[in-house]
Amino acid sequence: MTGTATAHETLARWLAEARSAVAFTGAGISTESGIPDFRSPGGIWTRYRVIMYQEFMSDPEARHEYWRQKAEGQLEFAGARPNAGHEALARWEDQRRLVGVITQNIDGLHQAAGSRRVLELHGTALATECQDCRARFDVAPLVERFRRTNVVPPCPKCGGDRLKHATISFGQALPPAVLQDSFQLARQADLLLAIGSSLVVEPAASIPRTAKEHGARLVIVNRDATPLDAAADLVISESIGETLAAVDRCLAAAKT
């Protein structure tokens, strides 16, 4: 089934019926807030070479290049605000229609919209983490320091030079506890909404598949086709913000 007014009503009904609905989100939900998909043509990952995690850890020059790229990437987040899609998910959690959000995104927009239970598979771009002492710090003043001095900032706590954004780099393992909690939510879900994700990046892409294998209805809301479309109970290929807002209106109308 593809996106129509009937699809919005169907999803609203399934949300109303669900006891353990979970959202799984990817870059597509945030592009509508002005944050580009880094994998798309012209995105940062297409313009610069990838700094692997082990290279970052062992090579000062690689760390400088990493910070240069991240300082530019930080500009992509400046001024971004949650859109109607983020707001709908936060509202559904508040209404106890949604158990939580599992996200591949690093922008913090779910939390900014008011979502409370957010599992960040790929970390957050709003903080830095020292790879030696594991202390965390707000990212903004450290990025500004790098832009001003062109020197990788030392860890404010231990003075080490392996201060890194608290995101998951290529070659770096996803946080085991977050991954475990995400799969546990998926196994317990009776409805999983896969929103704005290509569903090709593993192991994250296996989370919606796991939910489906454990009996959940699977709904995919994404601009482009995904490898799981054939297995989904409902596919909506429309604007994410407009779709979730329409579903929200259907939910509100059903209560009157």
Image (cartoon, helix red, strand yellow):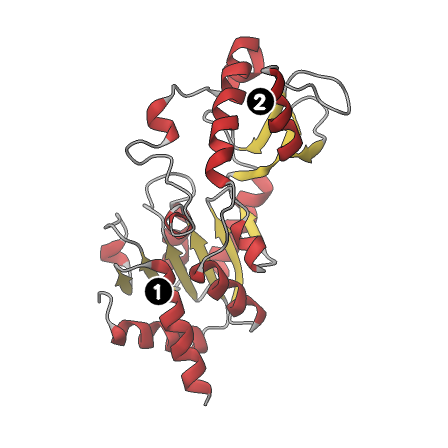
The answer to whether 20 appears left or right of 10 in the picture is: right
Mark pair 1, 2: CA separation: 37 Å
Residue closest to the eye, 151 or 161? 151
Instruction: Give the answer, above or below, for where 223 lies relative to 171.
Output: below
Name the image quarter holding the C terminus.
Answer: bottom left
The answer to whether 248 appears left or right of 112 in the picture is: left
Can the viewer see residue 59 in this picture? no
Residue closest to the eye, 155 or 234? 155
Name the image quarter holding the N terminus.
Answer: bottom left
Residue situated furthest bottom in the rendering: 256
Residue closest to the eye, 134 or 62? 62
Residue situated furthest front in the rendering: 148
Q: Count all numbered tags in the image, as a single digit.
A: 2
Residue 83 position, x and y percent, is 45, 58
Q: What element carries label 1?
A: helix
Q: What residue type is labelled 2?
A: Arg
Residue situated furthest right in the rendering: 157
Identify the residue position indicated by label 2 in the image. 147
Q: What residue type is labelled 1?
A: Glu
Q: Which residue is drawn at 41% across and 21% down?
A: 50
Residue 173 position, x and y percent, is 52, 30
Instruction: Give the answer, above or below, for where 177 lies relative to 155.
Output: below
Instruction: Give the answer, above or below, for where 11 lies relative to 254.
Output: above
Identify the residue position indicated by label 1 in the image. 242
Task: Of the two numbered discs 1 and 2 on the same chain, state the one appearing first in sequence.
Answer: 2
